[in-house]
Image: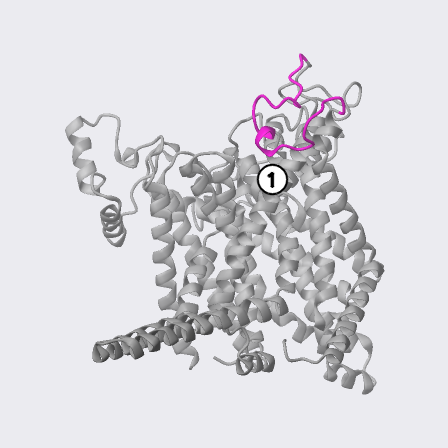
Amino acid sequence: MKRMNVSARKGELEARLADFKYTLHLLRRNPLVLSGFMMAIFFTVLALTANTVVDPATAGPPFHFERSYMWNNPYINWGPLAAIYPGPESFVLGTDGYGRDLFKMIILAIPLDMYIALIIVVGSASFGITLGALAGYAGGKIDELTMRITDIFLAFPGLILALVFAAMFGRTINNLMIAVLLVSWPGYVRLMRGQILSEKEKAYVEALRALGTGYPKTLGIIQILLNTFLDKLVIFGRHLRILLKLQYIVNKVVGIVFDTLVTLWMHLRILFRHILPNSIYPLLVQMTLDYGGVILTFSALMFLGFSPSPALPELGNLASDGYGHIFDAPWLILFPGLTILVIALAFNLMGDGLRDVLDPRLRR
Amino acid sequence: MRLHEYIIRRLVLMIFVLFGVSLIVFYLSRGFPSAIAPWTPYIREKMTAQQIEAVIKVHGFDQPLHIQYVYWLRDVLNGDWGSTGTWANGRPTTEVFFSRFPYTVELSVTATILTIAIGLPLGIISALKSNKIPDHISRIIALTGYSTPSYWFGFMLQLVFFYYFFLWGLPHLPSSGVPTEQIPWVTGIPILDGLLTGNFNYSWSAFLHLILPAFTLAFISLGYLARIVRASMLEVLRQDYIIMARSKGLKERVVIYRHALKNALIPAVTLTGLFFAGLLGGAMITEFVFARPGVGQASLRAIYQGDSNFILLYSLVMAAIIVIANLCVDIAYVFLDPRIKY
C-alpha cells in the first residue's frame, strides 16, 4: 500500500519476519517434514545430474529432455547383456527385458518423470488459479458459468478423460501431458475461488478500492493531452460547430473506452497484486501435494500402455515392462514402482507438513 | 432457499453436467480419425456393402460430428446405447455394462468399508497424540497410502500373498480373477449371490478373491480419510465446549468419544460418500491388475479399441453417480450439522 508511512511499514516487515522465523521453527521441529524436504532435494539434484551419474565419462548436458525419450539416447546401454538377468551379481538391480541395466534406466527415468510432473503441475495450477481467481472476484454469471464447466470436468470418473484423450490424440509425450493436465486443473479452480470469495470481503480490499489503487496515471495523462489538443483545434479551427461536435464524440467514446479499461485494470490489479498473494498459500501446498499425484497419474497412463515407445525410460513404462514377469522377475516391477513411491512420498510429506505449518487454525 | 428447492436445482444442474460430459466424451471419442471406424461395433461379419451403408445411414455416421451427436442422443433417449466392439463380442452396451457393474460395486463397497475401518482409528489416534510418535507413524501410513502407485501395490500384494505364500507352503490368497463356478444370477454381486443361493463355498471363494483388490483400493484412500479426521478432530478438541466438558470433571474417554468425536466425524461421514463414488471410478486400474471382470477393466478395453459407445455409457453412469454422491453429501450435512442451512 502506498500511503503507509515508513514506521508502520517497518513494523509490518518485522512482524512478517518473526512470522517467517516461527514457520521455520515449526518446520524444523517436525522430523517428517524435514525428511520430506531432504528427499525432495535429493531427487531434484539426482534428476539434474542424471546423465552424469549414469555415465560420468560422457561429456554432455546433465539432462536433456528431448533426447531422453529418443531411441538413440546415448546414455542407454544397448549392450549385448542378458535380458532379464537378476541383480546384484553384475548389475545392482539386474537387467530389464531389453537387456539394459535397470539401475541406470531408473536413474535416467527420474528426470523425465519429475520434469513432466513439474510442467503439468505448474501448467494446471496457473490455469486453474487464474480462472478461479477471476471467477471468484467477478462473481455473478461469470462465476456461475466457470463453476458449472469445472463441475463437468470434476464429474469425470478417475482417469477416463485422460485415457480417452491419450487414446484418441495419439501417444506422444505432449499429448499425455495435456491429458493429465485436463484431469488436474479443476481442483485448483475450486480451491482458488473459495479463497478469493472469503478474501475479497475483507476490509482492506474495500480500502484499496476507496484509495483508487492501481489507477493508471499514464492513461489519464493521455486523455488530458488529447483533450488539450482538441481544444487547440477548436481555438484555431474555422469549422467550430463540427469541431465541437467532434470533440464531444471523441470525448464520449474515449471516455467510455478509457473508463472500461481503467476499471478493468484497477480490478485486475487489486485482484492479482493484493488479494491473490494473500490467499495463495493453500494453493502452493496443494501444488506440492499434487506433484506426487501427478507423477502417479502420469506413470499410471504409461503403465496402462499409453507409452509412445516401449523402450522409453519412464518409471511407469519400466514397471509396465515388468508386470508380465511378475513371478519370475519381480525386480522389474519392484524397483521402478518403489522409486515412484519414494518420490511421491517425499513431495507429499513436504506438502502435508507445509499445510500444517501454514494453516492458521492448526498453527498454535 | 428450502431444501427441496435446493435438491431440484441440483438435479437440474446434474442434467447440465451430464450433457457436458457426454459432449466432451463424444467429441473426443468420435471426432478424431482412429484406427477403428466408429460404425465398426454395428457391423456383423456377413453384412453386404449395402447393409453396411444402411447401418451408417441409420446411425448418422456419414453426417458431420454435431449432427452425429444428435443422432446419438436420439438413439440414447430411445434406450438404444448401441453395441460394443469385438472385445465384448458386439453384445448390447447396456447388457455388457450392467452384467459387469456388480463386480465393481462389490469391490468399491468392500474398499470403502476397509477405508473406514482402518482410516478412522488412524485419524483419531493421530489427533489425540498429535506431534508424538503415534501421530508420526499414522502420518507415514497415510502418506505412503496416497503416494503408492496402485498398480504396483496390487502386483506386490499378488507377489507376496499368492506367490511367496505358495512357495513357503502357507495358506495363500488367489492372485487374480473371480470364482469361475457358474451359479444362478440373483443380484450379480458374487458374495451376495452365493449367500442367497446357499452356496457358501462360492461366497467364501469370492471373498478370498476380493481381499487383495479391496485392500489395494482401500490403502490408497484411507490416507485421505485419516488426515481429514485428524484435522477436524484437532479443531474440535480446541473448542470451548470440550474445555467445558473437561472442567465438569468428565473422564477423558467420555470427553473424546461422546463429545468430540461426534462433531469431528461430520466431515468424515459425509466424505465417505464421495470416497465411494471416487472408488467406483478409480477401480479401473485395480480391476486391470487383478483381472476382475468389472466395468473399469471393461472401459479400459473399450478405450484400447476406440469403442465410443461403451466409453460414453461408462462415463455418463459414473458421472451421474459422482454428482448424486455430491448431492447426498450436501444433504447429509444439513441433517448432521444444524448450523448449516440451504
The structure residue drawn at horizontal position 64% and vertical position 29%, both measured from the top left corner, is: A326
**In the displayed structure, does residue A76 sit left or right of residue A183?**
right
Helix, strand or loop at mark 1: helix
Can residue A61 be seen here?
yes
Residue at image location 58% in from the left, 45% down from the top: A119
Residue B197 seen by the camera: no
**Which is nearer the eye, A84 or B268?**
A84
Q: Chain of mark 1?
A: B
Q: Crowding at label 1, few (<14), some or many (≥20) Cα neighbours within 10 Å? A: many
Q: Locate residue B44 relative to residue B253 in the image: left or right.
A: left
The N terminus of chain B sits in image quarter: bottom left
Classify residue A345 as left or right of residue A217.
Answer: right
What colour scheme has been applied to the protein in the rendered image? one colour
Q: Is residue B291 magenta?
A: no
Q: Is residue A75 magenta?
A: yes
Quadrant housing residue B88:
top left
Q: Which residue is mark 1?
A: B151
Residue B51, given in percent of the width and then of the height, sits at 17, 31
Q: Which region shows up in magenta?
A: A56-80
Q: Residue at x 34, y 57 (%)?
A: B19
Residue at screen point 59% across, 41% down: A116
